[in-house]
Image (spheres, rainbow, N blue to C red):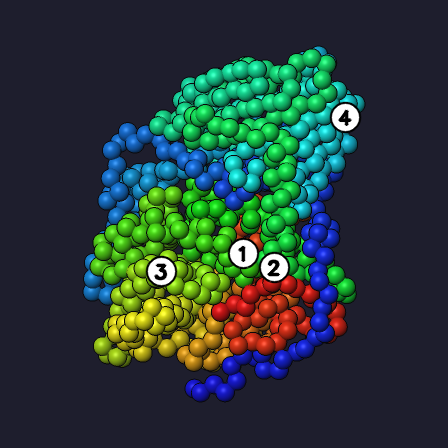
Amino acid sequence: MPVFFVLFACAIPYLVAAQSKIDRRALVSRHNVVNKNADSLSSLSLGNGRFAFTVDATGLQTFPEHYDKGIPLGTQSEWGWHSFKDTAGYKFEESLKTYTFNGRKVTYAVQWDKPQRNKDAADWFRQNVHRLQLGNLGFLLLHNDGTEAAITDIKNIRQELDLWTGAINSYFTFDGEAVNVQTYVHQDMDMVAVKVRSNLLGERRLKVSIRFPFPTNEFADYGDNWKNEKAHNSGFVSSGNNAAVIYHQLDTTKYFVHLGWKDAASVKKIAAHQFVLSPKGKTNTLEFTCLFTPRKGPVITPGFAQTQANNIKQWKTFWLTGGAVDFSGSTDPRASELERRVVLSQYLTKIQCSGSYPPQETGLTYDSWYGKPHLEMHWWHGVHFALWGRTQLLENSMQWYNKVKDKARAIAKRQGYDGVRWQKMTDPDGNESPSSIGAFLIWQQPHFIYFAELAYRAHPDKQTLAKYAGLVQATADFIASYPTYDAQNDRYILGRGLIPAQERYDPEDTFNPTYELQYWRWALATAQQWRKRLGKQPDKKYAIILKKLTALPQKDGVYLATESSPDSYTNAKLMTDHPSVLGAYGMLPYNNKLDTVVMKKTFNLIWNVWSWKDTWGWDFPMTAMTATRLGLPQKAIAALFMPVQTNTYLPNGHNYQDNRLRLYLPGNGGLLTAVAMMCAGWDGCNTINPGFPKNGKWNVRWESLKKMP
């Protein structure tokens, strides 16, 4: 069907007067987080993208058990991983199961039900390696009789996260005595710096404790498992007047904590895995630093004042560069809340998702899926950095793909494909984690090409091409080799043998999902553009697939989730999880294989019939992006504020999902991606703020955002 109008929202440009420069400090600071009680869902984090430290109402991690069912008091890093000893001698091949798809035998690493040996092997490789909670750094608060404080003894709480400077300033009273705490995380080191002022220091009733928990080897690890104390070791490497080095060893994993302090104090081991820093003399001030590192040393660590200056400088640079969106002056009652979510999401994704590896969905706070990253989520974790003019923060983690490309190539070869098949649930070294769903997902495969294209748009030069061209081609080679030729209909199909982004389908029966078909087309077309930029001829195989890849499946004038599911919108099970068919036009640009009239009808149907309570945090931004491209700004805003639990944003900015996932960073990243597109639009869109209603209620000013492809 020919399509004569393509970009609904961009048909008529909407012009506004030149805007005044945004006062960025005022914008950011009006969303500082203030806590006045010890709400377990309101804990606050500091970090640098490679290391994060989450505190309770005391400014440290004094009461971890109180918070472990909320936002836990985690201390995690990129390098902190551990694996239990494999006493059974498992081989990864034992997790592989052979399937016959499209006339070929293919092996996938899955979670076996039986036989027991295969199940145990798959479980072992799924659970190991796992991310470590490195240590609990808290106060030891003592009553006059020597008993330890309970959380209920902490009174008059007033705690503030200063977003502009990257500081947490905490005030509370204990037994009538005031305690003031300033907490920072160094922006270039995995180090916490703290300044405490209280008369309790001189009374020996306020000390600093560091404890080493044992890994749980479970789906989640909250950093407060004090069992199994004989299964690991900790002790002093050295101890002096103003510094001490402590080691912690679990099996073959060993790391170190470098403690340093300014004033007279000493460190003593008081339990198997607990060390206490005690001030000396009649002091009311204690400054100390705590560096977590895999290196024994020697290490020169800056003090509190240097760390404070480091934070003030680097956070100011962060907030003054890249994008900003200001909704002040809007009369829509949702505007101020949207601005709050946007500012806090920038902060949270900077400290949790901007490091050298794809992040896990709960960042560097607590483990989910054993602390492992899921590569299909990397799009939601990282794309927004480029759209907000901070492409380097995305490129930080893109380097990891080069590190693990040989393992990705081995997966493709094992399954009979060309190029690299990117892992789904993985680890720092790129190993597969067995998964009965993840092994069959394919929508992570084009992501690297999307990332590389964003990098090129930021820096359209030969250096960028040289940096990423090899992996763009290897990725496209897999994408071109994956479809199966259907001779009867002279077309190429995706599947059987896949699970789409909407994880509600049996891989043995599923083929031609709409979103993945569109993503396949975009990726191969973009790979051809990269070849042209490099002075190469178009790849003939890519061209054949592009020409003959299956048309997007329809029924009754709407796009189906998959061609194999004609009951997409009548089967209750198939109207839960991600409505990923919308991603074919929300996450991806238009091409002439997509009919926007059909997509608009599909959008309206999904809006009305979908089980929105059974969705995830990034589904709402994805829906908003599709609405924006379709010229439905009212629906875009409504999607961002849909009253569903998984669309909840806590006072600290985290996107809450459920009791298992109390924070979910793909939701925060998705929100930033959607808002950037709703403001700046996409290629070919000349409308100002296409995602916001032109009803006089929205005053939207923004700077330095980039158009989406």
Mark 2: secondary structure:
loop
- Mark closest to the chain's N terminus, 4 or 1: 4
C-alpha span from label 4 to label 1:
41 Å
Q: Say if 91 sits above or below 178 in the image.
A: below
Question: Residue flagged by tag 1: what amino acid is it?
Answer: Arg
Image quadrant assignment for residue 635:
bottom right
Question: Residue flagged by tag 2: what amino acid is it?
Answer: Gly
Residue 181, position as x, y percentages in the image? 69, 30
Mark 4: secondary structure:
strand
Q: Say if 598 sits above or below 697 in the image.
A: below
Q: Name the residue under label 2.
A: 323
Is residue 645 something one can see in this rendering?
no
Neighbour tally class for label 2: few under 14, some 14-19, many 20 plus, Cα within 10 Å: many
Residue 669, position as x, y percentages in the image? 54, 55
Neighbour tally class for label 4: few under 14, some 14-19, many 20 plus, Cα within 10 Å: some
- Mark closest to the chain's N terminus, 3 or 4: 4
Image quadrant assignment for residue 149:
top right
Choose mark 2 or mark 3, whichever is in front. Answer: 3
User: For residue 390, which numbered disc appears in the image?
Assistant: 1
- Mark closest to the chain's N terminus, 2 or 3: 2
Q: Name the residue under label 3.
A: 466
Mark 3: secondary structure:
helix
Left/right of residue 399 with respect to residue 245 in the rendered view = left
Residue, x 47% and y 72% (percent of image)?
589
